[in-house]
Each structure stands twice: as structure tokens, then as C-alpha cells.
Image: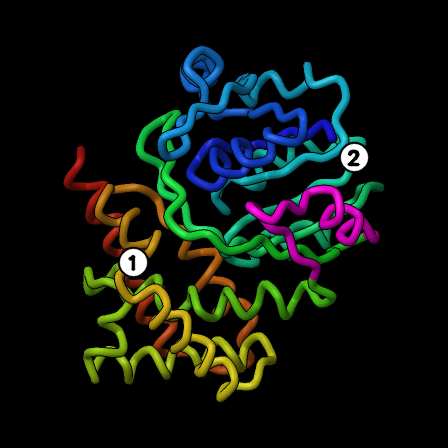
Amino acid sequence: MRITVIGAGAIGLLTAAKLSSIHEVQLLTRTNEQAKLISSKGICLDKETIHINAIPLDDLYTVQSTDLYIICTKQYDVKSVWDKLVSHAAAPVLFLQNGMAHTDMLLSSAFDYPIVVGSVEQGAMRVDSHRVRHTGKAGIRLANLTGNSAAMLVQRLHDPNFPFLLEKDWHRMLGRKLIANAVINPLTAIYRVKNGEILDCPAFCVIAEKLCEEAAEALGFHFAEQWAYVRQVIMTTKNNRSSMLKDIEAGRKTEVESISGYVKKHANRAVPYTDFVYYSIIGLTRQQERTSL
């Protein structure tokens, strides 16, 4: 397949590097500088160097033919990418994001090609603009948002060393992960702790359970089942530092709007614990913006 990967963060670099062993992959980056670096030096994945063509996103119009677009940007960049892509794409588009805000946007848009959404269970950490570490080997789950391309994509993309798995229900697939993120990400970012400390500290655990309850109800999920799943995720990733914690520490924008903000938007009752973590993360971000001036 000819694949165009948009976004060269950790997941974008990992996905482009892994898929290029079988497919013809082109990577679109935020800046011209990153595109030049990757085109000249390749993507360094752990101890391997993968040579791949990269161009800046502004040159999207020069992409003449592709069988699949994979959007790997952060949630807050999805709309600007989509605005560029929506009139240009003539192939299935796969979205690999945390959160679910992009589904609201896509379901209210007009287009005539298939949209597939994914849940990434792989672990990746970007070292710099062209180096990435594969920190957790699992899979990427795909489900149809519109159309029926997911099964075909799973069949063509799947590799035992980089597996793709088919899911029937996109809302359940993304919702389970969003609930886990709505618990783990803001708590670890606010209290600057690793994932496992949420369960190790009784006070944090109480807040986590309340956050899970609010998110599960907002999305129409069974609380007990989701709390068991969240606990499993925390224990499996107990030594990890969440992406939101890393963003706060680095002074970057977070994805709180598409995680806690999504819960707030879809809740049918007051969600005081979600409100607390949502406004806390926004406050921390703005405080960092002021101190960096």
C-alpha cells in the first residue's frame, strides 16, 4: 500500500517506521526542518535506522496518490489537519488519537470517503525530531466510524511484529481508553506521580474511582466493568509516566480538552471530580505559560 502518515510525534514516527518495512510510506511533518532531517538521516527506531521520505504538512497538496492517510497528530491539531485534508483526500483516512473529540467533529462533517478510528496500545517515546523508542509492544485496534474499510485495513496492515486488530464498535473501543485516560492522565499530571501511585495512595485511589464513575456514566458504560479495566491498565503501566504528566513537565499543551473536556460535554449531570481535574490542568498550563514569558 501507499500510505501517507501525517504527524511526526512519537506515534507518527513509530507507525511510519514500522509500516515502511512492508509498505511505501511518506511522512508529513509540522515543520520543514523536521522533514529535511528525517529525509536525510531517517527515523532512528531504537537501534535501527529506517530511511523514509518526509515533507512538511504545508506540501500536502503535492501528494498525488495514496491508498491510506493515517493522522497521528495530537487532538488539538486534528481540526487544522482535517481542514487541509478534507477536500484533498480520495482514500480512507485513519485517525490515531487519544480522546474522542475528533469523532464529534467528523460525524458532523461532510465527505464521501471512509473514516476509520484507532486505539493505540503501543508504547512510544520520541527522543528528538527523528528518534523514537518503542517502549511497549502491543497492538492498534481499528473500527469503522463511517464506511466499511476497517476490516480491509486490518488485513493489509497487520504484521505479527506490529499487529492491527479489528473492533466492531468504535464507541466502545475509544470509550474504554478515554475513561482510563480521564482517570490516569490528569491525576498523574496534577500530583506529578507515576501511574501506579494512583492505586498505591488511598487518597488518590478515591479520586480515581470517582473520576471513573463520572466518565463511565457520561459515556454510557457500566461503572464496575470500567473501574476493573482502569485498575488493570494502572497496574500494567505502573512504572509509566503519563503523556499528560510529560506535557505538563515540558510546558507543552495537553489534551485535557479531548479527554476530561469530552466527559464534561457528554455528561447529563454534574461531574465535580472531572471539573476539578479539568480546571486544575488548565490552571497548571496557563501558569506555565505565564512563567515562560
Horizontal side, residue 118 vs residue 230: left or right? right
> Could you say which disc has been placed on residue 54 in the image?
none
* Residue appearing at x 36%, y 42% in the figure: 125
Residue toward you, 89 or 107: 89
Tell me if residue 178 comes above or below residue 135 in the rendering: below
Disc 2 and disc 1: Cα gap in Å? 36 Å
Circle on res. 91:
2
User: Considering the image in quadrants, where does the C terminus appear?
Assistant: top left
Start-end of magenta stretch: 147-166
Write down the residue under mark 1.
240
The front one of 274 and 11 is 11
Residue 279, position as x, y percentages in the image: 32, 63
Residue 234: x %, y % from top left:
35, 70
Label 1 crowd bin: few (<14), some (14–19), many (20+), radius 10 Å: some
User: Is 56 placed above or below 188 here?
Assistant: above
In depth, the one of 32 and 229 nearer the eye is 229
Q: Looking at the image, which residue is at 65% across and 52% down?
A: 117
